Image (tube, rainbow, N blue to C red):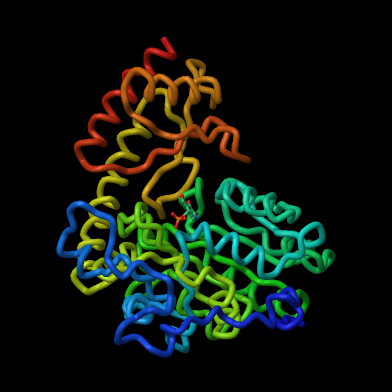
């Protein structure tokens, strides 16, 4: 049943990548791309900026960066992985937000096709679907464990052939919960014989999940086995590079080729790829892993201290991301959106500490989402959090 040739919109299926003379000729007096060959209009120029030749268009293919990324992911595959990633499995974008949008444009006809999401989930899916005139269908995550309801999803996608994509967030935002890998694999297998659609697993927070022994929980190394699987990752979180905007889409080679044809040829700037190349070397990855280790240690400390507070209820979510989602109580010990949103406001306005109120998300009543900062930041957060929460409930 799953067939990329009928899933992808016909206008995309025949798309050829944009070609430039630079694809064939890279050296000599380059007068092919209407660039300014005098150089950048900068009064001062650093050695790096000079080296990057910023007056030139960037490389549309980024093979070296892709190779470093797959070396990293292949070095610790998923336990069910049978085939390593190759650079042809990757498409790079301006953050994973670009991939979220591109997959919609690739598979969904505006005004006709639909996207299935499992709330509570990341807000951009809704925004991108609305912009593309793609209707959203919702099957909530189960409560209280925030996992997928596979049977309900299967029923929905088989009864509505206009659903072309399923977006899952694992670990979830705002749930901080990894979705069980086996249940996604089961869904990939069971759905492919009944449904012509893609399961997209957004792994923005995957590096904050504790590994499964010597294996990674990431599903990125499974895309060559499951043609209906797409995995999204980003350098915005564990790599600490939200400012450079670099997202990665992993998928089967055929779909990847189409996505690479769809993307704007120069979407990854020379400045971005220069930094991303450094971050994905062995040294960069080891710095990332040190930060992740510290964040995981702090996550435990912050969560335990917060859960000890008088007016904090349970940990609504899991411990698989660089944030936590906790339940705020009123003076009667009941979960309260009123107190949670006042706490959010007072912390931001009077105490210069900004967290995120999430109490209006499905099954997150009373919820406040807190990113785990440095030890110093967390100490200040905990001190002010307790004081303001006690005052609000006095
Ligand atoms: C689940 C999820 N996916 C994607 C993103 C966006 O990532 P990027 O910065 O790569 O666009 C976020 C950002 O908060 C997120 O929470």
**Residue 245's image quarter?**
bottom left
Horizontal arrangement in the rendering, residue 351 relative to residue 366 (left or right): left
Residue in the picture at 38% in, 56% down:
236
| Outermost residue toward the right in this view | 159
Horizontal arrangement in the rendering, residue 81 relative to residue 74 (left or right): right
Q: How many discs appear?
A: 0
| Outermost residue toward the left in this view | 47
Q: Nearer the viewer, residue 126 or 39?
A: 39
Residue 92 seen in the current view = yes
Horizontal arrangement in the rendering, residue 186 relative to residue 329 (left or right): right
Position above or below: 238 against 36: above
Position above or below: 127 against 293: above
Residue 219 seen in the current view = no
Residue in the picture at 17% in, 53% down:
44
| Outermost residue toward the top in this view | 394
Q: Nearer the viewer, residue 203 or 325?
A: 203
Q: Nearer the viewer, residue 155 or 28?
A: 28
Q: Position of residue 41 (x, y in %)?
A: 28, 56
Rendered-image quadrant of the C terminus: top left
Q: Position of residue 131 (x, y in %)?
A: 67, 51
Q: Position of residue 165 (x, y in %)?
A: 68, 65
**Residue 56's image quarter?**
bottom left
Q: Position of residue 55 (x, y in %)?
A: 32, 66
Residue in the picture at 36% in, 55% down:
237
Position above or below: 230 against 329: below
Rendered-image quadrant of the N terminus: bottom right
């Amino acid at each position: 049943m799953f067939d990329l040739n009928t899933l992808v919109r016909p206008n995309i299926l025949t798309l050829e990548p944009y070609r430039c003379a630079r694809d064939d000729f890279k050296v000599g007096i380059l007068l092919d791309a209407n660039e300014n060959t005098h150089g950048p209009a900068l009064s001062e120029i650093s050695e790096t900026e000079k080296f990057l030749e910023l007056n030139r268009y960037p490389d549309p293919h980024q093979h070296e960066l892709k190779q470093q990324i797959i070396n990293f992911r292949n070095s610790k595959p998923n336990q069910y992985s049978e085939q390593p990633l190759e650079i042809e499995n990757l498409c790079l974008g301006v953050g994973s937000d670009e991939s979220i949008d591109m997959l919609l444009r690739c598979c969904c006809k505006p005004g006709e096709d639909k996207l299935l999401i499992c709330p509570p989930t990341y807000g951009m899916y809704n925004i991108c679907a609305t912009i593309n005139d793609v209707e959203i269908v919702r099957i909530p995550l189960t409560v209280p464990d925030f996992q997928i309801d596979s049977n309900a999803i299967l029923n929905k996608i088989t009864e509505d052939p206009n659903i072309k994509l399923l977006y899952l967030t694992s670990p979830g935002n705002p749930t901080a919960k990894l979705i069980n890998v086996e249940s996604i694999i089961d869904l990939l297998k069971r759905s492919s014989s009944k449904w012509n659609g893609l399961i997209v697993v957004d792994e923005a927070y995957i590096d904050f999940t504790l590994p499964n022994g010597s294996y990674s929980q990431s599903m990125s190394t499974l895309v060559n086995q499951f043609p209906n699987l797409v995995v999204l990752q980003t350098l915005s979180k564990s790599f600490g590079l939200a400012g450079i905007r670099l997202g990665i889409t992993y998928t089967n080679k055929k779909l990847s080729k189409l996505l690479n044809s769809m993307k704007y040829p120069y979407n990854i700037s020379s400045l971005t790829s220069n930094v991303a190349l450094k971050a994905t070397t062995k040294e960069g990855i080891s710095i990332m892993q040190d930060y992740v280790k510290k964040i995981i240690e702090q996550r435990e400390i912050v969560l335990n201290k917060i859960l000890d507070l008088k007016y904090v209820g349970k940990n609504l979510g899991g411990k698989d991301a660089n944030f936590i989602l906790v339940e705020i109580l009123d003076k009667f010990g009941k979960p309260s959106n009123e107190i949670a949103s006042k706490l959010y406001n007072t912390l931001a306005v009077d105490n210069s500490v900004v967290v995120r109120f999430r109490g209006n998300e499905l099954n997150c009543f009373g919820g406040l989402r807190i990113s785990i900062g440095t030890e110093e930041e967390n100490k200040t957060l905990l001190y002010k959090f307790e004081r303001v929460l006690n005052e609000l409930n006095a």
